[in-house]
Image: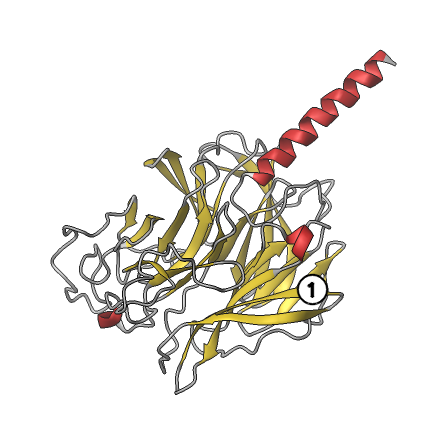
């Protein structure tokens, strides 16, 4: 009996620790012990060995195309956005091949389509699910929109469009977009410069910005430009070319992001109120034809990145590694790459980058990376669309 009681106490301590880790990891999913996929008894592929970790790759979802975003429901189900405009549900570890109904109308063009998906921090109380997507704009063209909705069975209800960026553009490039919540339930999301480079420093547009709203879509009274008649009140930070990765830091509770440069000059930044991150006035990159965009990599009043990648890695998706599932990866940021087609690890000491590692060469165009409530890292690749889970070798 004593041995049983001690084992029970130990189990409760471990469970509590895991839940606490998930609640502080910056993902917009409540902590919990949900199980999404069974763990295989054996693996046919060899162990992947990296600088700090050896692991197996488990294919958990296949038969996708461009799985842009993932959200893990606390009951063990999973939502996946396809850029082509569908949202799919995974139940009992199996992909339902019929997309969910009543999704917002999406404009699919180039890089635009159905993009990120995130749960409200209080999802278990209010049921809200947030998505960003490309949408046609009144007056012509398209831009990035934010909506929220609730899932009822296999269809969405209470669909509310909360925001649409302006103006509209005819091209299909640089929609962003990632979503993050902070501890006060403000919702942040990114809009790219829509390839209208000259407008990225123009606060009268929603180009190359991070937007900050209340969770109901209203504008916070303390937004940095809310009293500037020449600026859009929803803007929180600007000069950010095309953010496709954004997360709440698990310790500092600030919003971190990475963004695409042109040819070189991809960056990691900490997003702070009212700051100008410089695009296109400063950059470490050049135009795609090699011509100079600007001779400057720094100017007064413009923020410097924590890290820049030149040549480009085309970053997409990011997740802070939390919990104790991956010894040696503590304080690491995992970043997907689209151009070199690998998973990139950035080791951090506070705001200092101390090491980098290229993992899983040629795994595919890594579109999204997430820490899930089961304590594991997941990432998606595209064309063909596959979602992997990383399982420590031991």
Please, which residue is most extreme toward the right here? 1
Locate residue 237, reporting x and y percent.
Answer: 32, 57
Residue drawn 40% across and 57% down? 221
Residue 20, compared with residue 379, is above or below; it is: above
Residue 169, compared with residue 126, is above or below; it is: below
Locate residue 110, reporting x and y percent.
Answer: 42, 76
Please say whether residue 225 is visible from this viewpoint.
yes
In this orientation, which residue lies closer to the viewer: 281 or 185?
Answer: 185
On the image, numbered disc 1 is attached to which residue? 151
* Quarter in which the N terminus is drawn: top right
Residue drawn 72% across and 45% down? 35
Locate residue 90, reporting x and y percent.
Answer: 70, 59
Left or right of 57? Residue 355 is left
In this orientation, which residue lies closer to the viewer: 353 or 392?
Answer: 353
Residue 156, compared with residue 263, is above or below; it is: below
Residue drawn 79% across and 22% down? 8
């Amino acid at each position: 009996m004593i041995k049983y009681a001690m084992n029970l106490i130990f189990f409760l301590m471990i469970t509590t620790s895991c839940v606490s880790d998930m609640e502080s990891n910056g993902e917009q999913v409540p902590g919990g012990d949900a199980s999404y996929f069974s763990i295989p008894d054996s693996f046919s592929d060899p162990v992947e060995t990296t600088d700090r970790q050896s692991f197996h790759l488990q294919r958990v979802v296949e038969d996708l195309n461009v799985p842009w975003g993932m959200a893990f429901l606390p009951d063990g189900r999973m939502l996946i956005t396809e850029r082509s405009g569908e949202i799919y549900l995974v139940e009992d570890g199996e992909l339902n091949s019929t997309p969910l109904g009543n999704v917002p109308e999406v404009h699919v063009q180039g890089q635009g389509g159905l993009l990120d998906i995130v749960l409200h921090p209080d999802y278990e109380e209010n049921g809200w699910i947030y998505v960003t997507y490309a949408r046609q704009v009144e007056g012509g063209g398209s831009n990035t929109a934010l909506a929220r909705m609730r899932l009822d069975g296999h269809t969405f209800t209470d669909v509310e469009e909360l925001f649409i960026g302006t103006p509209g553009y005819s091209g299909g490039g640089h929609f962003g977009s990632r979503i993050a919540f902070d501890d006060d339930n403000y919702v942040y999301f990114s809009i790219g410069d829509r390839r209208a480079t000259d407008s990225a420093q123009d606060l009268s547009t929603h180009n190359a910005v991070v937007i900050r709203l209340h969770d109901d879509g209203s504008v916070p009274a303390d937004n940095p430009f809310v009293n500037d008649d020449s600026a859009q009140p929803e803007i929180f930070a600007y000069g950010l070319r095309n953010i496709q990765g954004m997360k709440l830091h698990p310790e500092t509770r600030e919003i971190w992001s990475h963004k695409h440069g042109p040819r070189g000059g991809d960056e990691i930044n900490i997003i702070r109120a009212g700051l100008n991150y410089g695009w296109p006035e400063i950059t470490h990159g050049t135009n795609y034809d090699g011509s100079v965009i600007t001779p400057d990599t720094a100017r007064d009043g413009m923020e410097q990145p924590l890290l820049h990648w030149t040549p480009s890695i085309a970053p997409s998706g990011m997740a802070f590694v939390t919990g104790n599932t991956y010894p040696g990866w503590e304080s690491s940021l995992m970043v997907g790459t689209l151009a070199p087609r690998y998973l990139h690890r950035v080791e951090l000491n506070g705001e200092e980058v101390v090491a980098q590692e290229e993992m899983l060469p040629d795994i595919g165009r890594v579109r999204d990376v997430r820490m899930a409530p089961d304590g594991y890292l997941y990432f998606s690749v595209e064309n063909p669309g596959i979602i992997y889970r990383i399982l420590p070798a031991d």
